[in-house]
Image (tube, grey):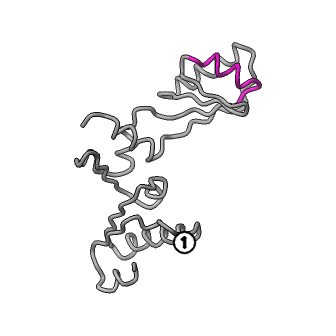
């Protein structure tokens, strides 16, 4: 279907759920095709999809529609600048359950192998490290994970328009 749509050499190509039903190799090939068509052929490609992890890997700009209104339109870096929480910090210590209790003020969640907390900036990371060390825990990992498109979408669409 994409090949037929490209025959008249369009300036705009609209793809609705383009990865639906594709195997992992097909998804990767489609993602690369979209980027190549845009970069080398100058075709603007509008992708409509609910699989935001895939959208994030193939686009430079996004539009988010909620309750029938466009609530954001711009580049991915602009969207990421709106995020409410800068990142989730993944932590691994010598006793993750104890670390989770120590970090209760950060709404810590934990499993035996790791702890997660939401942080605003690097100062929070440093404070958390000091708290854990002061409580005689060995800290093996402090890894900030930037919010992905899915979390940004949830943050924006759960906010009144």
Q: Position of residue 35 (x, y in %)?
A: 43, 68
Residue at image position (47%, 45%) is 148
The answer to whether 147 appears left or right of 1 in the picture is right
- When asked about the image quadrant of residue 143, the answer is top right
* 1 relative to 92 in the view: left or right: left
Magenta residues? 92-104
Residue 142's place in the image compared with 129, above or below, is below
Q: Position of residue 23 (x, y in %)?
A: 57, 69
Q: Residue at x 64, y 17 (%)?
A: 101
- In this view, 55 is above or below 65: below
Circle 1 SS class: helix
In this view, the residue in front, 125 or 148, is: 148
Horizontal side, residue 145 vs residue 16: left or right: right
Question: Which quadrant of the rendered structure holds the C terminus?
Answer: top left
Q: Residue at 49% of width from left, 69% of height from top?
A: 32
User: Which image quadrant is residue 40 in?
Assistant: bottom left
Q: Nearer the viewer, residue 49 or 146?
A: 49
Residue neighbourhood size for the residue with mark 1, other residues' Cα within 10 Å, grouped as few (<14), some (14–19), many (≥20): few
Q: Which residue is mark 1?
A: 26
User: Is residue 99 inside the magenta stretch?
Assistant: yes
> Residue 61 magenta-drawn?
no
């Amino acid at each position: 279907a994409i090949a037929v749509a490209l025959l008249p050499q369009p300036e705009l190509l609209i793809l609705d759920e383009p990865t639906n039903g594709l195997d992992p190799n097909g998804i990767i090939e489609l993602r690369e095709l979209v980027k190549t068509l845009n970069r080398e052929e100058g075709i603007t490609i509008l992708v409509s999809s609910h699989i935001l992890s895939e959208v994030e890997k193939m686009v430079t700009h996004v539009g988010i529609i909620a309750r029938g209104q466009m609530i954001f339109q711009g580049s991915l870096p602009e969207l990421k600048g709106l995020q409410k929480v800068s990142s989730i910090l993944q932590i691994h210590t010598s006793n993750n359950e104890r670390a989770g209790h120590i970090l209760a003020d950060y709404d810590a969640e934990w499993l035996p192998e790791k702890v997660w907390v939401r942080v605003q900036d690097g100062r929070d990371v440093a404070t958390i490290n000091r708290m854990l060390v002061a409580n005689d825990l060995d800290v093996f990992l402090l890894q900030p994970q930037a919010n992905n498109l899915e979390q940004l979408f949830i943050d924006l669409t759960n906010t009144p328009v």
